[in-house]
């Protein structure tokens, strides 16, 4: 909590990692035991601190200050030189303007910060989404992240990122709010899992990094989201607006090992790839809000991972002013506390906080430098394109400041930015389709005598593909799930249309479709005539501000929607050649039909974007061979997964406690630990050809011993001067104010009267060390963007031979798993993969470099990575349960510092 300091900003700071909580014995910034209420009582295990993971309700972790000032590590040096030069020329008002959004619906993008026109710096356009450009027209809708994961193809992830970045740039968007690796996918019912990639940190991290590189190749800043522990939609904010009211967002409670070895892992890859921005999330982590969580932002992200870009709040996820500034937040979006409230935690309040000494100048300088460094790092000033669309209306003419009804003129230029991306979208859709069952039914020829197609998922939304705002309904085929992570379709090719067109082009055969899920008698009639029946079914989810059929973002269950199981049973009872195609955001239950002998094939097609129908035709009719693999596990029941959504509050009206008691054991890791047989395992997928695995070989490299990073940072720089004359900060006389707009100016020369934060009258203090701008010790696990550079030293190279033993060319996703050997370790975890295209009768070499990180555990005592003494087992195969090759690595701990 905060008290009045000078002409203070009085802020309520719920659980800022024990900010001045003297009752917490570890509230002294003790980083040797950072998770005081976790289950690390055995943190001195005799085998190098390999301990059991877990969490407890109401656990906290200590404060970590000061907020690290970035120093231009890695390839950021040139961008930092430019950023420091330009920020040195800025006034305090201009720096504050960079950090603060102008308010909801007050400029043309979903978020914009203030400009610095004197120095030629425009307002930056922050625009959703991770599948395209949201809230505009003449743009593409790319396949969802879960489909990219199902391709297991780094090249396609990069190409998709590049395509989205191109469209953002040419619409005038400077920051793409994506890609996503939070949620990771702790619970299969999680509403926004599809925005990310997979519930595996290695697969997610690799595709997250490639997506970032692709986006930023187009001079657009990638904003990775949501940091961190954001694993469900229920209770993500105070009062979810539907069933229950809570006073605080839920707290994701997790331990140090789980944080590092699971949830933080893909963020290491993203930071190492040069990610320019990170969005902090709505939830709390260990009972401190993500956007004012000093341990998570200052220690983990900025100090440990060496993140050089800027941290942006999710929309209205900022919960305080001074506390969030000191805890590492760099930009607030959309700027106002409540939408269109004309109030802000920052803006004029941040100006006051710097002038009265509550926030040191070096902290606001660092905010501005980080923002400008990201701008220069991606070359956003290169071939700069002004904003040419409006998020609030598709009308050509309207108000530039929409909510204020100010600035009438042309606001939508309707620029077509699609650039033939439909071909790439079609390719990804086909490459991500997973063949789960095939009793000889596929591929089809297009010359079948009678083809029947069934289910609303094969057809169109009667309201049009964009008929439901933010795709907030489940009508017609599922080409895009719902929420802010969506975009408007330019068109949507439905499966029914594409199949009908395929049959038409063949010039033979009959096609009939029944698109009503409940027209059972009509479905029976058509199925009885069909030589092949194709049933389409789906399962949808999205962001929690929309409820669809009672699903508040998160899915209520794992069943198919619209009672599709009954439709499948109805059709398959009449046709002994029934193919089931599933469009879903994640796993669904298939036990009611998977063993039905009349169901001759099952395909999972994910959520494939605008070319949905063409993509599925490509694989069903053999134009493209199936090569996708499941990016999650399909179980027999929801209980198989061992995790679930917290659907009801468990702490009265205070913060619901979401305890990650399972530690790292989610998805296939949980199935393996519990000895549970899945229906279809993680990494599974069939092909029209067959493959064999042979000749595993492991070569050791002379990588040397690990060296923890030592030394100190430079002192925090103060860039430029701050005037003590408050008259320099009042509103200019010649400024025409826009109503509701957030400005950095003071209302008067009195700091106290200019601060518009309410006085809660709660005693407290500035956290110890938060204003300390002196040189700080470097963390042993730090040293470069992504962490200690030696974590990426290659210790071993594993090779194996993959042979196409069939008669047609096919893609095989070869996978490498490692068992680290400890009693509390995951049984085996993905550590490498490669999608190989192999001609019939030919072989390819599968190669994976195992890095130091790949073989390491996180040590809670030294706060660094280490390799345990246990033997490591290397597995190579076609899925997490089909691993015909294995070998053992002994003595890997010799690569440790003191081995």
Image (spheres, grey):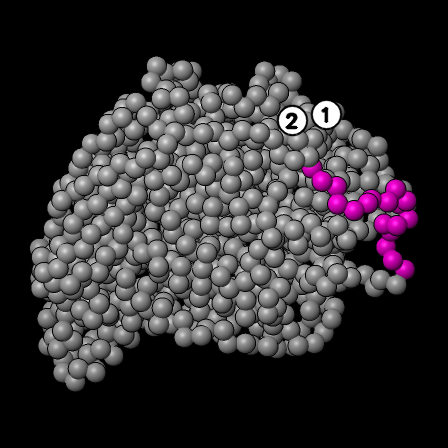
Marks 2 and 1, how far apart in space?
8 Å
Q: For the magenta stretch, what is the residue range? A: 716-733
Which element carries disc 1, helix, strand or loop? loop
For disc 2, the marked residue is 19
Pick the residue in front: 591 or 5. 5
Which residue: 18% across, 69% down?
622
Q: Is residue 100 visible?
A: no
Q: Is residue 545 above or below residue 228?
A: below
Question: Residue 150 at x, y = what percent?
Answer: 30, 54
Which residue: 56% across, 35% down?
303
Q: Is residue 730 visible?
A: yes
Q: Please give left or right for residue 769 compared with residue 598 in the image.
A: right
Pick the residue in front: 350 or 212. 212
Which element carries disc 2, helix, strand or loop? loop
Question: Residue 224 at x, y = what percent?
Answer: 50, 50
Task: Answer with the quarter of the image where residue 354 lies.
Answer: top right
Numbered disc total:
2
For disc 1, the marked residue is 764
Question: Mark on residue 273?
Answer: none
**Residue lying at the far bottom of the rendered structure:** 507
Q: Residues within 10 Å of mark 2 (few under 14, many from 20)?
A: many
Which is the main secondary structure of the residues drawn in magenta?
loop
Say whether disc 2 or disc 1 marks the residue closer to the N-terminus: 2
Q: Is residue 268 above or below residue 743?
A: above
Q: Residues within 10 Å of mark 1 (few under 14, many from 20)?
A: some
Q: Please give left or right for residue 676 compared with residue 85 in the image.
A: left
Which residue: 35% across, 72% down?
423
Question: Residue 220 at x, y = what percent?
Answer: 54, 61
Asked whether the residues under the numbered discs 2 and 1 touch, taking CB atoms below 8 Å apart as contact, a structural biologist would say yes
Q: Please give left or right for residue 888 compared with residue 737 in the image.
A: left
Question: Residue 311 at x, y = what percent?
Answer: 59, 46
């Amino acid at each position: 909590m905060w008290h009045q300091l000078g002409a203070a900003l009085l802020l309520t700071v719920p659980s800022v990692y024990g900010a001045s909580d003297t009752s917490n014995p570890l509230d002294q910034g003790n980083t040797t035991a950072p998770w005081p209420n976790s289950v690390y009582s055995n943190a001195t295990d005799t085998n190098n601190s390999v301990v059991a993971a877990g969490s407890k309700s109401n656990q906290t972790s200590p404060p970590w200050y000061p907020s690290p000032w970035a120093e231009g590590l890695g390839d950021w040096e040139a961008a930092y030189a430019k950023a420091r030069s330009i920020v040195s020329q800025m006034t305090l008002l201009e720096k504050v303007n960079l950090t603060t959004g102008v308010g909801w619906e007050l400029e043309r993008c979903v978020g914009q910060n203030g400009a610095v026109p004197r120095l030629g710096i425009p307002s930056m356009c922050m625009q959703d989404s991770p599948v395209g450009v949201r809230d505009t027209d003449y743009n593409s809708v790319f396949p969802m992240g879960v489909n990219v994961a199902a391709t297991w193809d780094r090249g396609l992830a990069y190409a998709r990122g590049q395509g989205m970045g191109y469209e953002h740039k040419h619409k005038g968007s400077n920051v793409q709010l994506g890609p996503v690796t939070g949620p990771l996918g702790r619970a299969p019912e999680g509403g926004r899992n599809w925005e990310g990639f997979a519930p595996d940190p290695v697969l997610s991290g690799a595709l997250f990094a490639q997506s970032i590189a692709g986006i930023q190749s187009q001079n657009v800043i990638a904003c990775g989201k949501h940091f961190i522990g954001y694993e469900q939609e229920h209770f993500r904010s105070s009062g979810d607006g539907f069933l229950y009211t809570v006073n605080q967002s839920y707290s994701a409670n997790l331990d140090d090992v789980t944080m590092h070895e699971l949830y933080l892992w893909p963020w290491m890859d993203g930071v190492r790839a040069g990610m320019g921005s990170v969005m902090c999330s709505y939830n709390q982590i260990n009972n401190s809000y993500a956007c004012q969580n000093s341990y998570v932002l200052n220690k983990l992200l900025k100090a440990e991972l060496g993140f050089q870009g800027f941290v942006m709040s999710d929309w209205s996820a900022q919960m305080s002013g001074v506390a969030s500034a000191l805890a590492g937040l760099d930009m607030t979006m959309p700027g106002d506390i409540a939408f269109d409230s004309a109030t802000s935690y920052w803006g004029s309040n941040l100006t006051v906080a710097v002038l009265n000494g509550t926030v040191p100048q070096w902290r606001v300088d660092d905010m501005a430098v980080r923002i400008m460094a990201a701008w220069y790092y991606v070359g956003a000033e290169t071939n700069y394109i002004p904003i040419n669309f409006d998020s609030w209306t598709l009308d050509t003419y309207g108000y530039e400041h929409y909510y204020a009804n100010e600035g009438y003129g042309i606001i939508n230029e309707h620029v077509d930015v699609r650039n033939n991306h439909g071909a790439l979208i079609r390719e990804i859709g086909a490459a991500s389709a997973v063949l789960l069952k095939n009793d000889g039914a596929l591929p089809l020829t297009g010359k079948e005598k009678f083809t029947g197609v069934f289910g609303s998922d094969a057809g169109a939304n009667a309201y049009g593909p964009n008929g439901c705002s933010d795709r907030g309904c489940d009508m017609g085929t599922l080409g895009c799930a719902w929420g802010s992570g969506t975009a408007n379709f330019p068109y949507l090719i439905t499966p029914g249309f594409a199949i009908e067109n395929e049959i038409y082009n063949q010039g033979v055969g009959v096609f009939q479709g029944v698109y009503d899920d409940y027209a059972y008698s009509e479905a029976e009639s058509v199925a009885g005539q069909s030589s092949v029946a194709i049933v389409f079914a789906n399962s949808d989810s999205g962001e929690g501000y929309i409820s669809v059929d009672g699903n508040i973002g998160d899915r209520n269950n794992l069943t198919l929607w619209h009672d599709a199981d009954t439709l499948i049973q109805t059709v398959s009872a009449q046709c002994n050649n029934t193919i089931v195609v599933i469009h879903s955001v994640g796993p669904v239950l298939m036990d009611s039909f998977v063993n039905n002998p009349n169901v001759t094939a099952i395909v999972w097609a994910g959520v494939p974007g605008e070319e949905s129908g063409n993509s599925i035709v490509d694989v069903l009719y053999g134009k493209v061979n199936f090569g996708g693999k499941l990016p999650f596990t399909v179980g027999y029941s929801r209980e198989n997964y061992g995790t679930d959504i917290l659907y009801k509050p468990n702490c009265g009206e205070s913060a619901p406690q979401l305890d990650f008691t399972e530690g790292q054991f989610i998805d296939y890791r949980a199935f393996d630990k519990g000895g549970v047989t899945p229906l279809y395992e993680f990494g599974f997928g069939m092909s029209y050809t067959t493959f064999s695995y042979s000749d595993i070989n492991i070569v050791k490299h002379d990588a040397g011993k690990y060296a923890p990073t030592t030394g100190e940072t430079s002192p925090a720089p103060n860039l430029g001067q701050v005037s003590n004359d408050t008259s320099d900060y009042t509103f200019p006389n010649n400024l025409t104010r826009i109503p509701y707009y957030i400005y950095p100016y003071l209302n008067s020369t009195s700091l106290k009267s200019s601060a518009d934060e309410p006085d809660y009258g709660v005693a407290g203090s500035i956290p110890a060390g938060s204003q300390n701008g002196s040189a700080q010790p470097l963390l042993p696990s730090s040293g470069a963007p992504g962490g200690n550079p030696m974590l990426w030293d290659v210790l071993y190279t594993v090779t194996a031979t993959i042979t196409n033993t069939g008669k047609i060319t096919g893609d095989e996703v070869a996978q490498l798993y490692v068992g680290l050997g400890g009693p509390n370790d995951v049984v085996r975890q993905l550590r490498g993969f490669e999608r190989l295209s192999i001609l019939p009768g030919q072989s390819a070499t599968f190669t994976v470099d195992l890095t130091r990180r790949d073989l390491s555990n996180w040590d809670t005592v030294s706060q660094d990575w280490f390799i345990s003494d246990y033997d490591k087992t290397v597995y190579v195969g076609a899925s997490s349960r089909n691993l015909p090759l294995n070998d053992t690595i002994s003595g890997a701990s010799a690569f440790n510092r003191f081995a």
